[in-house]
Image (cartoon, helix red, strand yellow):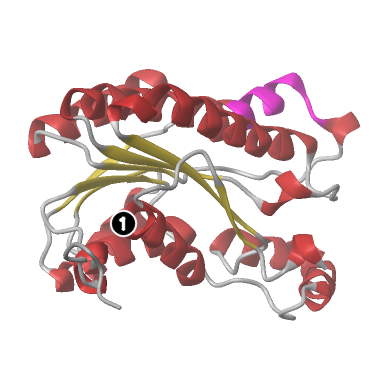
């Protein structure tokens, strides 16, 4: 049975040509993987990270896709630096269609050993930085009546876990931020979604392995129904879906990428 109106093809629905995307924490890991998939889909990119060396390497790796790629070194926990980067993106691209809040840290500290300074550092980067970035992007999106904001959360929002308290609180806050933004910005045709991955094979996880946590990480992976951790690209594919027109009627939701962790 044919549709009563012409339907766009799958290729058209995933096509991001003509759209500009900002990705924070884009130098390595999940952020770099997200940038790669968005570039492949045709988006122009503005990549932000504090890691200048790997940010340059990511830009070089993405040149094969032929899209415009701008990079800026900035600490997203610093409001002035992040706001300046956002304004520079607007100046260069004249718009922001997609904003991905991916930057984050996860120091391993028992709750009784977390200092106020460490608590503030995690919340400032993981949550406050996402709020500042989303607000800057949304102000531009509202005027154009279109846009997508993605917050990279964590599967820890769904379960009691051994992850540090400040990390878990920051990621739960991202979900609440996602929901509030979705409600307030929906009338302006701006969609807001959270993507919540489980343990993923990133440089951060590799550092944890080198610091003596390899056995615990392997045991965790074996408990997952899929019996392994995620790859950065597997998370990036879900982000591509979320920002594309394939997800045109989705907002305020959490897309869980966890290998069945929260359903076993």
**Residue 106 placement (x, y as % from top left):** 66, 45
Quarter of image, res 98: top left
Give the residue drawn at x 59%, y 69%: 201
Give the left or right position of residue 88, taking residue 235 as reference. Answer: left
* Closer to us: 2 or 6: 2
Residue stretch rendered in magenta on the structure: 114-123
Q: Which one is in front, 220 or 79? A: 220
Place residue 50 in its image quadrant: top left
The residue where tag 1 is placed is: 244
Residue at point 18%, 23% (across, down):
143
Give the camera-side residue of 51 and 191.
Answer: 191
Residue 126 in picture, x, y percent from top left: 56, 35
Secondary structure mostly seen in magenta is: helix
Was residue 117 drawn as part of the magenta stretch in this picture?
yes
195 over 123 or under it: above or below: below
Residue 229 location (% of width, % of height): 66, 73
In the displayed structure, does residue 101 sit left or right of residue 87?
A: right
Quadrant that contains the C terminus: bottom right
Q: Is residue 109 left or right of residue 252?
A: right
Answer few, some or many: residues within 10 Å of disc 1's Cα (few below 14, many 20 plus, some between 14 and 19): some
Secondary structure of the residue carrying numbered label 1:
loop
Question: Looking at this view, is 157 or 167 the one in front?
Answer: 157
């Amino acid at each position: 049975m044919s549709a009563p109106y012409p339907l766009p093809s799958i290729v058209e629905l995933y096509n991001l040509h003509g759209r500009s995307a900002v990705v924070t924490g884009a130098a390595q890991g999940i952020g770099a993987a997200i940038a790669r998939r968005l570039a492949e889909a045709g988006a122009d990119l503005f990549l932000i990270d504090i890691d200048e060396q790997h940010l340059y390497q990511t830009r070089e790796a993405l040149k094969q896709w032929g899209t415009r790629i701008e990079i800026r070194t900035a600490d997203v926990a610093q409001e002035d630096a992040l706001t300046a980067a956002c304004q520079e993106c607007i100046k260069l691209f004249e718009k922001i269609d997609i904003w991905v809040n991916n930057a984050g840290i996860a120091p391993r500290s028992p709750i009784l050993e977390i200092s106020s300074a460490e608590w503030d550092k995690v919340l400032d980067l993981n949550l406050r930085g996402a709020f500042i970035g989303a607000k800057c992007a949304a102000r531009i999106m509202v005027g154009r009546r279109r846009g997508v904001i993605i917050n990279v959360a964590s599967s820890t929002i769904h379960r009691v876990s051994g992850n540090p308290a400040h990390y878990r609180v920051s990621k739960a806050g991202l979900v609440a931020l996602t929901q509030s933004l979705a409600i307030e910005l929906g009338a302006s045709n701006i969609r807001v979604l959270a993507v919540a991955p489980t343990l993923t094979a990133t440089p951060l996880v590799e550092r944890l392995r080198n610091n003596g946590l390899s056995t615990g990480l392997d045991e965790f992976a074996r408990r997952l129904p899929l019996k392994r951790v995620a790859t950065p690209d597997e998370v990036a594919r879900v982000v591509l879906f979320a920002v594309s027109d394939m997800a045109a009627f989705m907002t305020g939701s959490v897309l869980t990428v966890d290998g069945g962790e929260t359903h076993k």
